[in-house]
Image: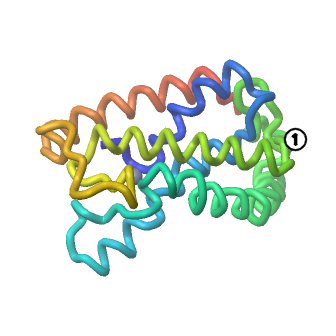
Amino acid sequence: MPLTPFHPVLPWLPYVRWPRAFSWWAVTLGAMVPDLEVVPMFLVSGDIYIARGLMHSLLGALTIDAAVTVVAVWLLVPRLIRWVDRRWPGTHILTFAGQDLRRDPRDLPTLYASAAFGALTHVLVDVLNHAYNPVLWPWQKGPLNLLPFSDQLWYDLFTIAIWSVFLVVMMRKFWRR
Ligand SMILES: [Zn+2]
């Protein structure tokens, strides 16, 4: 079960290879945005195991997830950069894979493609980690239960351990402070 902050490490793999083809912020936020629906859906349904909906579908990744991500990058990232520069001036905290994240692309085609790509990786990874996934919504009837051990505790702990290592390795290799 990749916890929300683990998800960006997968789209970071092509990012570190071809950084100029992507927006780092859109890839990173796009890979986390689908989980925005989990808390409200849990509160409505009362069942954490079915708390995934439109934002965890392929259609949702290309539409609402990408749109929310692009707006978030436009509205929040400049503020975040100003705050980091005030808080930790003169550090390389905003450098990843040799790229200055202050100079990340802002054009809509790059932002949209990066956001949609990040969200798609999230949706597809979740298919292998949860029994209930409306990935083919609205064409899908019933849950897509691909792995018989999805949502079992041992499998969750096993995948959390693997994703933790993956995240630490990527941060150590590509993030310099
Ligand atoms: Zn998710």
What crowding class fits label 1: few (fewer than 14 Cα within 10 Å), some (14-19), or many (20 or more)? few
Q: Where is residue 148 in the image (x, y as percent from the top left)?
A: 12, 38
Give the answer, above or below, for where 71 lies relative to 115. Answer: below
| Along the line of sight, the residue nearer the viewer: 80 or 155 | 155
Where disc 1 sits, the SS reads helix
Q: Name the residue under label 1.
A: 103
Residue at 58%, 51% in the rendered image: 62
| Along the line of sight, the residue nearer the viewer: 132 or 168 | 132
Residue at 34%, 61% in the rendered image: 52
Give the answer, above or below, for where 172 lies relative to 102. Answer: above
> What is the residue that sits farthest to the front in this orientation?
139
Q: In which quarter of the image is residue 83?
A: bottom right
Figure label count: 1
In this rendering, position of residue 85 left or right of residue 42: right
Residue type at mark 1?
Answer: Arg
Residue at 77%, 49% in the rendered image: 88
Q: Where is residue 84 in the image (x, y as percent from the top left)?
A: 76, 53
Q: Where is residue 71 in the image (x, y as percent from the top left)?
A: 72, 63
For ligand 1, tell me if the residue under mark 1 lies within 8 Å: no
**Quadrant in the picture for the C terminus:** top right
Residue at 30%, 65% in the rendered image: 51
How has the structure been colored for display? rainbow
Give the answer, above or below, for where 150 lies relative to 99. Answer: below
In this rendering, position of residue 67 left or right of residue 167: right
**Quadrant in the picture for the N terminus:** top left
> What is the residue that sits farthest to the bottom in this orientation?
44
